[in-house]
Every structure is written in C-alpha cells, then in structure tokens.
C-alpha cells in the first residue's frame, strides 16, 4: 500500500488546510442546518429574553470550533492508509449489504431536520399558531429527539474510532464491546444511545482523543426519554417531566439550560454533516485515478464519485479484468465481488478465476500473460500498475 501514500503526497497538504478550518469554512458545506443554531431565536416564553439565553454568537462559534477540532482527526486522519484505507472508506460510507432505492434512513433524517429547521425559521400565521413561541420550543424538542436517536452519527463516529485504533470496520460496530448480558439484550432490542456513547467514550479514551466528551455537552438521557415518551410539559420558566403516573421521579430543566442543550445538539449534527461532506469532497478529488491498493494481487483502487463529485464508493481493478465495486447513492447500494467480513472486521473482495499457472507479477495473471485492467469510470482510460508507482 506504499503506493497510496505516494499517490496522496500531493493531497495531504490539502488535508493540512483543515487544521485551520474555522466556522465560516465549514458552514459552506452544510448551510441548511446552520441557521438553526439559535433554536428558539424568536422565543421568549413569559419574558425569556436574550439575557436569559446564555449562548451568544461567540459561544456558538467557539462550541462549533471545539467540535470540529475533536472530530477532525477521525474524519480526516493523518494516515488514512496503514490501517487499510478500505476500512476508512467503509466507515465514511456506512457499508452494509446491497439495497435498492429508499432504504437509507440517513437521507430521511437529514430531510426531516431540514424541514423542522425551515418551520422554525418561518413566520407562522397567528390564526393557526396563536402561541408561536411555544411552537418553536416544541419543534426544537422534536429536533433534539431526532438528533440523539439517529443511528448514522453514532455508527460513523464509532467506526472511524475503530479505524483509528486498527480495530477494523463493522456494520454493527458496538457488538464486540458488549458483555454477554448486553449481547443477549441486543439481539432482542438493540442498544440505547447512552450505551453507544459509552462505547464511543471508551474508544476515544483508548485513542487519546476527546471525541466522546462532545456528548457530555448535550446528551441527557432523562430529557431524551421524556420527549420520546411524550411525558413532558412546557411552562413559562421550565421544561417539566412527571416520569410516569406517580411523579416520584419528576424533574425540571430551566429553559435557558434547555436552550443550551438543544443548541449544542444542533451544532454537533451540523458539524457531523459538514465533516462528513468535507471528507467525501476531499476524496472525490481523486476521481479518474488508479493507485496501487494490493501489492500482491496488483489491485488498483479507483475512487467513485456522485454527481456532485463527493466520494460515494470505490472500485478495485484486478489484473484479470475483474472488478470489486462498492457504491452508495440515492438509488441504492451496489456491491459487486465484495462482502462484509464481520469475523475479521473488514471488507472481503472476490477476484474471479485464478489461472492454472500464475505469473510472478500477480496470482491473477497467467504465466507469461499480460495484466488486463478494466477502464476507469468517466475517464475511458485503461490503468496500468506502473502508472502510479
């Protein structure tokens, strides 16, 4: 895989640009969610005013930069090669099995967050919404609930941490970190966000990275449960939850504290979307190139891109004219000659037929034969192993 390091030598200075990444730069990659940073910007339930809402624009900018600094090392690793770049790409692309169109909840989650945000920024008609301030709070609570329940951010962050630590990729990145009782419960009901966060914190600590600390800023299990179970009441000064019929475990959250929790959850998810897009955009710049991936079989890797030039997959060109392809688009997932290898926490490739007598160049080439690669997508060029050395 030395070829990848050499081939990326010109690209890595671009990665260094991200060390100076600021609020304005990343804002450009997820504009739809950035105007929502004041979730209750028009809200003042019973005189709740700007003085009460403690997060200023400077606070928001500082928090966002903090989250960028925490997440950037895993989204844009200094060394994307040594721990098998396929596992890194798999983490970004959330590799799973084949799917046809309409089975990716990540797309729907982004859409609903943008819809909720648009509603919150709309001047609602008084006749339909006599208490618009309360409506904005309720939209903010729904948004918070959706953010902390989404699977994709937890899965991507967990797998990127696993990649950083050399622990491979798995479409279920949590299972090996559960104890026997948790594994039994997982088969019945999965695991809760709090358990996912606990695993992220454990991996973050092992990697000596502050990624897990982000969730302490906004994740509140009691608040999450109250919203999910519709067990809450909004009054002028606070958010209240009865916690069941008896009310013996009732609790309250002052609205200024609630505002901060909701705002930080939105800063997190907009930062996640921004870095996910930034990483895929960076790798999309490698389109129409083939660089050495497998030094034994002489497989060449090509980055595949979507219509907007974001990395959406990859193709391994083997010297016997076979290909291994993974591609995720809005139309579904395409997988050819590759599959999840959960036992070894990676992606396994198939290489078609082996020759009866292999050549020294590659086990896939007949002795004395000529390597035969398929053409690069969109370029119409047939790659050669030597072009990337």
Image: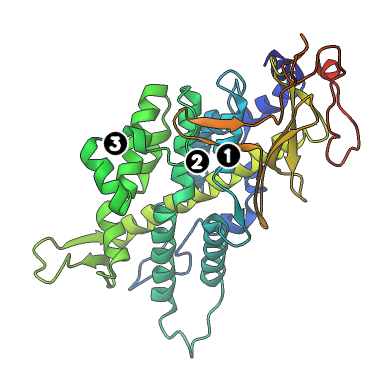
- The answer to whether residue 51 shows anywhere in this view is no
Q: Earlier in the sequence, mark 3 or mark 1?
A: 1
Q: Residue furthest right?
A: 380
In the displayed structure image, the side of residue 100 where residue 257 appears, left or right: left
CA distance for labels 2 and 1: 6 Å
In the image, residue 14 sits, relative to residue 335, either above or below, namely above
Classify residue 386 by image quadrant: top right
Image quadrant assignment for residue 108: bottom right
Say whether disc 3 or disc 2 marks the residue closer to the N-terminus: 2
Residue 178 tag number: 3
Marks 3/1: CA–CA distance: 23 Å
Contact between marks 2 and 1 (CB within 8 A): the answer is yes
Q: Residue furthest top?
A: 360
Q: Quadrant of the C terminus?
A: top right
Q: Which mark is residue 156?
A: 2
Whole-percent x, y for residue 231 in the image: 24, 69
The residue pinned by badge 1 equals 92
Distance (Cα) linking label 3 and label 2: 18 Å
The location of residue 14, given as percent across then percent down, is: 72, 27
């Amino acid at each position: 895989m030395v070829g990848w390091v050499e081939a990326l030598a010109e690209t890595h200075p671009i990665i260094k640009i991200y060390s100076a990444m600021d609020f304005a730069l990343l804002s450009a990659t997820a504009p739809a969610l950035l105007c929502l940073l004041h979730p209750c910007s028009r809200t003042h339930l019973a005189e709740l005013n700007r003085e009460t809402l403690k997060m200023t624009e400077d606070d928001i900018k500082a928090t966002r930069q903090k989250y960028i600094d925490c997440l950037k090392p895993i989204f844009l690793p200094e060394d994307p090669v040594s721990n098998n770049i396929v596992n890194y790409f798999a983490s970004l692309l959330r590799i799973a099995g084949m799917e046809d169109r309409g089975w990716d909840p990540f797309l729907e989650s982004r859409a609903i967050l943008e819809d909720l945000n648009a509603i919150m920024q709309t001047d609602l008609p008084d006749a339909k919404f006599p208490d618009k301030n309360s409506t904005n709070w309720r939209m903010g609570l729904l948004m918070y609930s959706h953010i902390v329940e989404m699977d994709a951010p937890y899965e991507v962050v967990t797998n990127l941490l696993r990649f950083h630590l050399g622990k491979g990729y798995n479409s279920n990145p949590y299972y090996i970190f559960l104890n026997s009782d948790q594994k039994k419960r997982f088969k019945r009901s999965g695991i809760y966000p709090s358990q996912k966060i606990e695993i992220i914190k454990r991996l973050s600590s092992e990697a000596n990275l502050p990624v897990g600390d982000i969730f302490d800023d906004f994740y509140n299990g009691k608040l999450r449960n109250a919203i999910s179970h519709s067990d809450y009441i909004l009054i002028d000064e606070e958010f209240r939850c009865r916690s069941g019929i008896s009310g013996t475990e009732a609790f309250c959250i002052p609205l200024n504290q609630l505002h901060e929790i909701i705002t930080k959850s939105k800063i997190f998810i907009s930062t996640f979307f921004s870095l996910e897009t930034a990483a895929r955009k960076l790798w999309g710049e490698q389109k129409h190139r083939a660089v050495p991936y497998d030094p034994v079989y002489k497989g060449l890797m090509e980055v595949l891109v979507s219509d907007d030039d974001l990395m959406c997959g990859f193709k391994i060109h083997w010297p016997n004219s076979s290909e291994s392809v993974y591609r995720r688009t809005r139309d579904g997932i395409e997988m050819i000659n590759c599959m999840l290898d959960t036992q070894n926490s990676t992606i396994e490739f198939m290489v078609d037929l082996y020759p009866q007598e292999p050549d020294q160049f590659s086990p896939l080439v007949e002795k004395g034969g000529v390597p035969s690669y398929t053409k690069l997508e969109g370029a119409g060029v047939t790659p050669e192993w030597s072009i990337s050395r």
